[in-house]
Amino acid sequence: MIAAAAPAMTGDAMADVTFDQQRADALIQDIGREIVHGSKFAARPWERIVVVAEIADRKRLFGYVYWDGDQWEAATPDGFRALTLFQELQAATQVPGKAPWHRCLVRIDRASGKIDIEFDHDGTRWIPDVADPEGFAKSLR
């Protein structure tokens, strides 16, 4: 399912595509496979998975799994492989002369197999709201 999906990339890195698009697309597919085949997602009846990668001074992943309407749960991909793939994606999408992105948002839709991806070069988007975790999780869906 995920291998056939075409990634959709948005954000300011796409304004001037001067990076290895083919390598970036392959990494996005690898990231999608790593996430959906992980133990936190593979056996679940999910509808959508959202993962945020922060690759800056601090390196971390966090995410959510959504199912059956408004139901959701915090869930982060297992192990270090996904984080390593995001670091490789950051390097592959690096535009010469520009700063790399700091955060990356990935949305995977089970029904379509589509992977949507957005980049944040400033590192100011997709910051969890500890005062309203449910509102934040639902806003990412």
Image: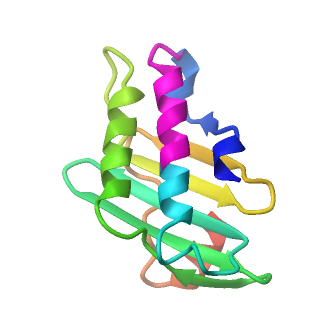
The magenta stretch spans residue 104: no
Between 117 and 115, the residue placed more toward the observer is: 115
Residue segment shown in magenta? 17-30
Please report the residue visible at 57 percent of the width from the left and 21 percent of the height from the top: 15
Residue 9: tell me if it is visible.
Answer: yes
Residue found at x 54% / y 73%: 64
Q: Residue furthest left?
A: 57
Depth order, front residue of 133/47 = 47
Coloring basis for residues: rainbow
The C terminus sits in image quarter: bottom right
Whole-percent x, y for residue 74 in the image: 50, 80
Q: Position of residue 91 (x, y in %)?
A: 32, 31
Does any portion of residue 105 appear in the rendered image? no
Q: Please give the name of the residue rendered at 73% of the width and 63% of the height, measured from the top-left corner.
A: 110
Q: Quadrant of residue 49?
A: bottom right
Q: Does the magenta-highlighted stretch encompass residue 19?
A: yes
The number of callouts visible is 0
76 is higher (above) or lower (below) than 95: below
- Position of 42 compared to 60: left or right? right
Q: Nearer the viewer, residue 92 or 97?
A: 92
Q: Is residue 75 above or below residue 127?
A: below
Q: Main secondary structure of the magenta part?
A: helix
Q: Taking 49 as reference, is 117 above or below it? A: above
Residue 87 lies in quadrant: top left
